[in-house]
Amino acid sequence: MQPPPTLRWDQGRLFLLDQTLLPHHVVEVEQVEGEQVRESIRRLVVRGAPAIGVAAAYGLVVAVRPDADGSPEQVLAEVQRWATRLRSARPTAVNLAWALDRVEGAALRVRDAAADGLEVLAAMEAEAVAIHEEDVRCCRAIGEHGASLVPAGGGVLTHCNAGALATTGIGTALAPLYVAHERGVAFRAFADETRPLLQGARLTAFELAAAGIDVTVLADGAAPSLLGDGSVQLVVVGADRVAANGDVANKVGTLGVALAARHFGVPFYVACPSSTIDLATPGGAEIVVEERSSQEVTCFADQQVTPLSVRARNPAFDVTPAEMVSGIITEHGVVAPSALGTLLGDAEPS
Ligand code: MRU
């Protein structure tokens, strides 16, 4: 079965595919108010940095709509209140704050000239649609730039899900795989299961298999030995935030994959839109890593698996130092992590 779109904006109505239920149940849930959108982001109904950004952009429109009959100033106050509220849903994926800032900026730009609150809301919706359309274009461009890295007849390892389900296009890390597949390149994909929430086993496996790509799921701990035995010639992962020095925050477990890839001399690439690059954050040490509920670790499929008396830690992301990253694939091309500032300085807006 082909996965339905991660989200839909249908005549002013926001629908999210509930990714907590995949792959066994395909359910779309309409988001009718701001607190519901925040909870959907927090619970990972919608997840993956670019998809969170697009969902939040539309979510801000949904959240503010009940107050749109107020004056432009009143609407703007609601925009700022809701942007702060939605921004707090998840701290690590910078696309969340980036998208909210853009929609808030669109509201600010029209406030003084707007006849009423509805005009402010219309400007916000137009910005959210623009963010959505850009995401689709960025994913395709990342795929085109990265496809030649996919080794014909070889193996490609990925961690978590940075595919269509994590974006509103063809993904980031998985985009080069989709484009290579379209071009007739045969390869084998390996998906780390990605404990504790199994984005690799549930989501990456689902979407790659649906696209007809040969995919094998691994226990996370198996990845280093496959990197060592010649099964894998390329690692490509997504990112939630890339700091100015090229350090990369991505789903917990990515650092271990990077260490093993470096040890065995396998190229390790990160794919992300330039909106994930945060030049305001100097290095990985400054990236806030989300700590989620310990129950995600102590339970498996809602069954307690650890002794009740035992504590658990659940950092949802880790930071891979820039020197372990062979290159960053963005919509503008493939660059060394040390060249991010130049890339963004030179890049045309997408
Ligand atoms: O907790 P998640 O599922 O939102 O984590 C997702 C990841 O870590 C992805 O690799 C990252 O957001 C890139 S998505 C294109």
Image: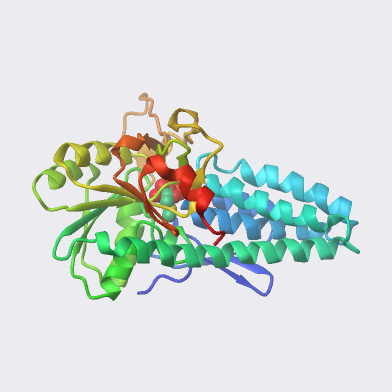
Indicate whether 47 appears above or below 211. above
Residue 183 appears in which quarter of the rendering?
Answer: bottom left
Residue at image position (54%, 49%) is: 95
Residue 155 appears in which quarter of the rendering?
Answer: bottom left
Quarter placement of the N terminus: bottom left
- Spot occupied by residue 232 in the image (x, y as percentages of width and height): 16, 52
Quarter placement of the C terminus: bottom right
- Spot occupied by residue 341 in the image (x, y as percentages of width and height): 48, 43
Question: Would residue 44 be seen by someone viewing this image from the given angle?
Answer: no
Viewer-side residue, 225 vs 104: 104
89 relative position to 212: left or right: right
- Spot occupied by residue 268 in the image (x, y as percentages of width and height): 27, 46
Question: Would residue 166 be seen by someone viewing this image from the given angle?
Answer: yes
Residue at image position (32%, 29%) is: 307
Furthest toward the left, the residue is: 229
Viewer-side residue, 81 vs 170: 170
250 relative position to 85: left or right: left
- Spot occupied by residue 280 in the image (x, y as percentages of width and height): 56, 37
Residue at image position (53%, 35%) is: 281
The colour scheme of the drawn protein is rainbow
189 relative position to 139: left or right: left
82 relative position to 294: left or right: right
Indicate whether 11 appears above or below 116. below
